[in-house]
């Protein structure tokens, strides 16, 4: 049985997702960071390492997002037939933004509702495309690395799970049809 990732799985994927950061000082090589990064240098690192380096004041995220970035992402999703490119840590940011909206007593209820509605709209648009690609892969084989490269790590997991579910379902249908003709 296939189990889609729950909250824990989502958090693990978020920790593995790439985050673009800028070095606030020179960073020497270590077992966790096998190359040297000069002050001001930008690099993509896994989310878990970024968390550690941010706490130490060694790096800062290059792309600090706002709700207007979510609005732009929704617009891009609506205007493209394929998934738009979004940062690997987009869902981690979106999850934090939704949590902030739910927990911030100073946030106006209208603003809270807007964040929640827009997050839902974005997720539904992206999922619609992922489902479509999972279905297309059944007709024409794999959809290709070009399409998958536009998906975040979270979305690739969903795509592969959906593809497997659809493939099994079609196999079951064909097995039943084959059994009744024989």
Image: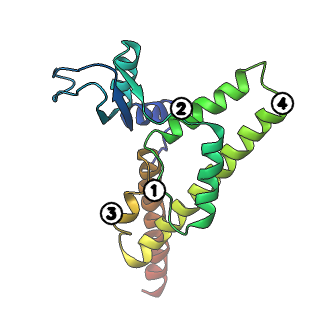
Mark 1 packing: few (<14 Cα in 10 Å), some, or many (20+)? many
| Residue at mark 1 to residue at mark 3: CA–CA distance | 13 Å
Mark 4 packing: few (<14 Cα in 10 Å), some, or many (20+)? few
Task: Name the residue tied to disc 2.
Answer: 7
Q: Work out whether residue 46 can be spotted.
A: yes
The front one of 132 and 145 is 145
Left or right of 14, for residue 30? left
Circle 1 or circle 3, nearest the eye: 3
Residue 95, quarter of the rendered image: top right
| Residue at mark 2 to residue at mark 3: CA–CA distance | 27 Å
Mark 3 packing: few (<14 Cα in 10 Å), some, or many (20+)? few
- Identify the mark at residue 159; answer none if there is no mark: 1
Q: How is the image coloured?
A: rainbow
Q: Give coordinates of residue 6: x percent, y percent.
A: 52, 36
Identify the image quadrant of the C terminus.
bottom left
Circle 1 or circle 4, nearest the eye: 4
């Amino acid at each position: 049985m296939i189990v889609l990732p729950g909250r824990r799985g989502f958090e693990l994927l978020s920790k593995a997702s790439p985050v673009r950061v800028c070095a606030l000082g020179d960073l020497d090589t270590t077992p966790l960071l096998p190359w040297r990064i000069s002050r001001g240098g930008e690099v993509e690192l896994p989310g878990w390492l970024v968390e550690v380096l941010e706490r130490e004041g060694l790096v800062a995220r290059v792309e600090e997002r706002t709700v207007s970035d979510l609005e732009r992402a929704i617009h891009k999703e609506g205007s493209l037939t394929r998934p738009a490119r979004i940062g690997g840590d987009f869902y981690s940011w979106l999850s934090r933004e939704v949590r902030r909206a739910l927990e911030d007593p100073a946030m106006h209820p209208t603003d809270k509702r807007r964040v929640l509605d827009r997050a839902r709209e974005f997720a539904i648009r992206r999922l619609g495309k992922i489902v479509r690609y999972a279905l297309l892969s059944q007709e024409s084989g794999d959809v290709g690395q070009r399409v998958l490269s536009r998906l975040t790590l979270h979305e690739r997991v969903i795509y592969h799970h959906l593809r497997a579910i659809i493939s099994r379902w079609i196999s079951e249908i064909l097995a039943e049809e084959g059994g009744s003709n024989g």
